[in-house]
Image (spheres, helix red, strand yellow):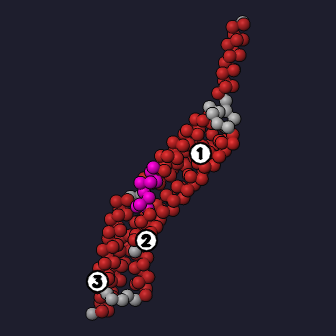
C-alpha cells in the first residue's frame, strides 16, 4: 500500500514538472508554424523560370517596338507601360528576393521550434518569452506580406501574359497598317 502511494505521489510530482505556464503562447506558436507551412506552399508556387522567360520576352518586344516606331499614340504607350510590368522594380524584387524567402521561411521555422521547446521546458522567463514571440510574429508577418503580395502579383501577371502579348502584337500590326 505504501509503495502504491509513493508511486502515485512520484508520478504526480514528475507530471507537474512537465507542465508549462505558456499554454497560450505555445498555441500561438503552433498557429504560426501552420501559417509558415501555408506560406511555404505559396512560395513553391512561384515559377521563377517562367518569370525570367517572360522578362526576356518583354525586353525583346520593347526593343522591337523602339526599332519600328519613333513615337506611339498615347493609348498604345500606356498599354506598353502596363505590358512592361516585368521590367519594373516590384517584379524584379520577386526574382531577386526569391532565394532569400526560402532562407527566411526556414529560419523562422527553426526559431519558432526553438522557442516552443524553450517554453515547453520553462527555460526562459515570461518577459523574454513575450518579447521573442512578438519578434517572431513581426518577422512572420513581414515575410508573409512580401511573399504573398509580390509573388501573387507576379504570378497573376504571368497567367495573363500570353493574352497581353497577343494584344500588343495586334496593336503593333494596327499601327503598321496605319503607317503604310
**Where residue 143 is drawn, which disc sits there?**
none
Q: Mark 3 points at which residue?
A: 67
Q: Mark 1 points at which residue?
A: 31
Kind of element beneath mark 2: loop
Location of residue 60 (image quadrant) = bottom left
**Residue 166 versus residue 25: which sits nearer the camera?**
25
Q: State the residue at coordinates (37%, 59%).
A: 48
Rendered view: 80 above or below 23: below
Q: Name the residue under label 2.
A: 88
For this orientation, the residue located farthest to the top is 1
Q: State the residue at coordinates (60%, 53%).
A: 138
**C-alpha span from label 2 to label 3:** 21 Å
Q: State the residue at coordinates (59%, 38%).
A: 116
Instruction: Quadrant for the C terminus, please.
Output: bottom left
Q: How many callouts does the rendering have?
A: 3
Side (left or right) of 6 relative to 46: right
Side (left or right) of 47 relative to 143: left
What is the x, y in percent for residue 135?
A: 60, 49
Going from N to C along the chain, the mark reached first, 1 or 3, is: 1
Q: Which of marks 1 and 2 is in front?
A: 2
Going from N to C along the chain, the mark reached first, 2 or 3, is: 3
Asked whether residue 99 is drawn in magenta, I would say: yes
| Mark 3, other Cα within 10 Å: few <14 / some 14–19 / many ≥20 | few
Magenta-highlighted residues: 94-103
Q: State the residue at coordinates (43%, 71%).
A: 88
**C-alpha span from label 1 to label 2:** 35 Å
Kind of element beneath mark 1: helix
Side (left or right) of 140 relative to 124: left
Give the dominant element type of the magenta stretch: helix, strand or loop. helix
Amino acid at each position: 500500500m505504501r509503495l502504491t502511494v509513493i508511486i502515485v505521489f512520484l508520478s504526480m510530482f514528475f507530471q507537474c514538472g512537465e507542465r508549462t505556464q505558456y499554454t497560450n503562447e505555445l498555441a500561438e506558436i503552433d498557429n504560426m508554424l501552420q501559417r509558415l507551412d501555408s506560406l511555404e506552399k505559396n512560395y513553391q508556387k512561384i515559377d521563377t523560370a517562367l518569370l525570367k522567360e517572360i522578362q526576356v520576352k518583354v525586353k525583346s518586344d520593347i526593343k522591337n517596338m523602339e526599332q519600328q516606331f519613333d513615337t506611339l499614340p498615347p493609348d498604345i504607350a500606356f498599354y506598353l507601360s502596363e505590358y512592361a510590368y516585368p521590367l519594373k522594380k516590384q517584379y524584379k524584387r520577386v526574382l531577386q528576393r526569391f532565394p532569400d524567402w526560402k532562407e527566411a521561411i526556414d529560419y523562422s521555422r527553426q526559431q519558432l521550434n526553438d522557442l516552443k521547446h524553450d517554453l515547453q521546458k520553462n527555460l526562459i522567463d515570461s518577459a523574454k518569452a513575450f518579447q521573442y514571440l512578438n519578434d517572431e510574429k513581426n518577422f512572420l508577418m513581414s515575410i508573409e506580406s512580401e511573399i504573398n503580395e509580390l509573388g501573387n502579383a507576379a504570378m497573376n501577371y504571368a497567367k495573363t501574359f500570353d493574352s497581353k502579348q497577343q494584344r500588343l502584337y495586334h496593336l503593333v500590326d494596327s499601327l503598321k497598317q496605319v503607317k503604310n
